[in-house]
Image (cartoon, rainbow, N blue to C red):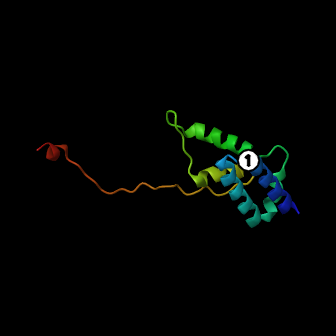
Amino acid sequence: MPVQAALRHIQKEVGDNAKDKMYAYVGGQLMKFIRENPDKAPLFTAPGKSINGSFEAMRKVAEKVRVGNTAALDPDEGMAIVLEYYGIKQEKPAPARETVDVGLSVDLDELLL
């Protein structure tokens, strides 16, 4: 029954924060993860662990990558941080975008003619 307990725990926290769409998104992703990985269910009911706590973990990571007053994590990065907060290590997510060398060469003299 650890799966049911974990699902109830997540559902309660989402319900308690029904106006916050971030809780709904992260909670939904966590419930999907629990169903797909039932052996990890007990990690989600560990004392002191909460979706709110995972938000704090994301905030700390975002502070490290912020530029000026902004910081962004893509959904895969965010969920990897959330899962790590609950004690689940996963492979690093692939970069959201890879840079592509398009081979562009510009000669300033040609532009000034």
Left or right: residue 93 compared with residue 29? left
- Residue at the (82%, 53%) spot, across then down: 9
Q: Percent position (x, y) of residue 49?
A: 79, 46
Q: Residues within 10 Å of mark 1 (few under 14, many from 20)?
A: many
Q: How many marks?
A: 1
In the image, is residue 85 above or below residue 42?
above
Instruction: Residue 8: name its quadrant.
Output: bottom right
Quadrant in the picture for the N terminus: bottom right
**Which one is nearer the viewer's eye here, 65 or 59?**
59
Quadrant in the picture for the C terminus: top left
* Residue type at tag 1: Ile
In the image, is residue 13 above or below residue 38?
above
**Which one is nearer the viewer's eye here, 26 or 95?**
26
In the image, is residue 62 above or below residue 91?
above
Which residue appears farthest toward the left when viewing the image? 113
Which residue appears farthest toward the bottom when viewing the image? 36
Which residue appears farthest toward the top when viewing the image? 68
Instruction: Residue 52: name its quadrant.
Output: top right
Instruction: Residue 76: name its quadrant.
Output: bottom right
Q: Percent position (x, y) of residue 23?
A: 69, 49
- Residue at the (57%, 47%) spot, across then down: 73
Which residue appears farthest toward the right when viewing the image? 1
Task: Give SS at disc 1.
Answer: helix
- Residue at the (73%, 46%) spot, across then down: 17
Q: Percent position (x, y) of residue 16?
A: 77, 47
Instruction: Name the residue carrying label 1.
Output: 51
- Residue at the (83%, 62%) spot, across then down: 3
